[in-house]
Image (cartoon, grey):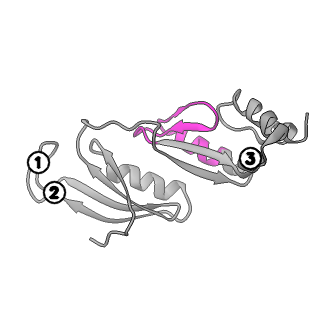
Amino acid sequence: MQISKNTICLMFDKDAESAARFYAETFPNSSVGPVHLAPTDYPSGKAGDVLIVEFTVLGIPCIGVNGGSYFKHGQAFSFQVATEDQKETDTYWNAIVKNGGEESMCGWCKDRWGISWQITPRTLTEAMALGGEEAKRVFTAMMEMKKIDLAVIDAARGGK
C-alpha cells in the first residue's frame, strides 16, 4: 500500500467501498484505488471482507476503513468544496442530499454515511474574507439558508 505523507482516514461501519465509489462518481479529480481485504476475522468482520479502501476526493488522498459502528462521524470534520456557480453548487448538494444524505444549515449537508460536506461558493468565501459591512450582510443572508443561494449572496454583497 502506497500511502501519502498526509492522508485522511475515514472510519465506516462496512461501506467504505460504496462511499469511495460514490465520491469518485460525484466529484472531479476523484478515484477509487486499491481495495484491501481483511487477512483474518476481526471484531467487525470476517476474513476476506473489505477492510481498507484507498481513494481520492477532489485530489485529496483518503483511506476508508471498515471498522464497525463503534466510531461515529461528526461535524467537527467536513470536506469543504469550493464551487464556482449555482449550477455546480446545486450539482454537488443534490448528489449528496438526494442519495440518502440530509440538509443542514449554511451550506452544510451530510452524506448517507454521515460524512459532513460544506458546499461553499467562492463568492461567499471571498465576501467573508473582506470583512466589514459586506461580510456582515453576506453572513446574515447565509445564516438563513440551507443550500447556498448565490443570487441572494450576490445581492447581499451589493448591499441589497
Residue at coordinates 53% horizontally, 65% vertically from top-left? 29
Residue closest to the eye, 111 or 118: 118
Please state the horizontal and vertical placement of residue 41, each as a whole percent of the image: 8, 50
Hey, which quadrant is residue 135 in on the image? top right
From the viewer's perspective, is 112 left or right of 153?
A: left
* Disc 1 + disc 2, Cβ < 8 Å: yes
Instruction: Determine whether 160 is above or below 55 in the image.
Output: above
Residue closest to the eye, 15 or 60: 60
Residue at coordinates 31% horizontally, 46% vertically from top-left? 11
Numbered badge on residue 86 = 3
Instruction: Determine whether 40 is above or below 69 in the image.
Output: below
Residue ranking furthest to the top: 144
Q: How many dots with numbers?
A: 3
Please state the horizontal and vertical placement of residue 75, each as a whole percent of the image: 47, 37
Numbered badge on residue 42 = 1
Q: Secondary structure under badge 1?
A: loop
Mark 3–mark 2 Cα distance, whole angstroms, equals: 42 Å
**Label 1 crowding class (10 Å Cα cut-off): few <14, some 14-19, many 20+?**
few
Please state the horizontal and vertical placement of residue 145, each as a whole percent of the image: 69, 30
Quarter containing the C terminus:
top right
Residue ranking furthest to the front: 132
Please state the horizontal and vertical placement of residue 62, each as a whole percent of the image: 39, 59
Residue at coordinates 37% horizontally, 69% vertically from top-left? 4
Kind of residue indicated by mark 2: Ala
Numbered badge on residue 38 = 2
Magenta region: which residues? 90-115
From the viewer's perspective, is 81 left or right of 88?
A: left
Residue at coordinates 81% horizontally, 40% vertically from top-left? 132
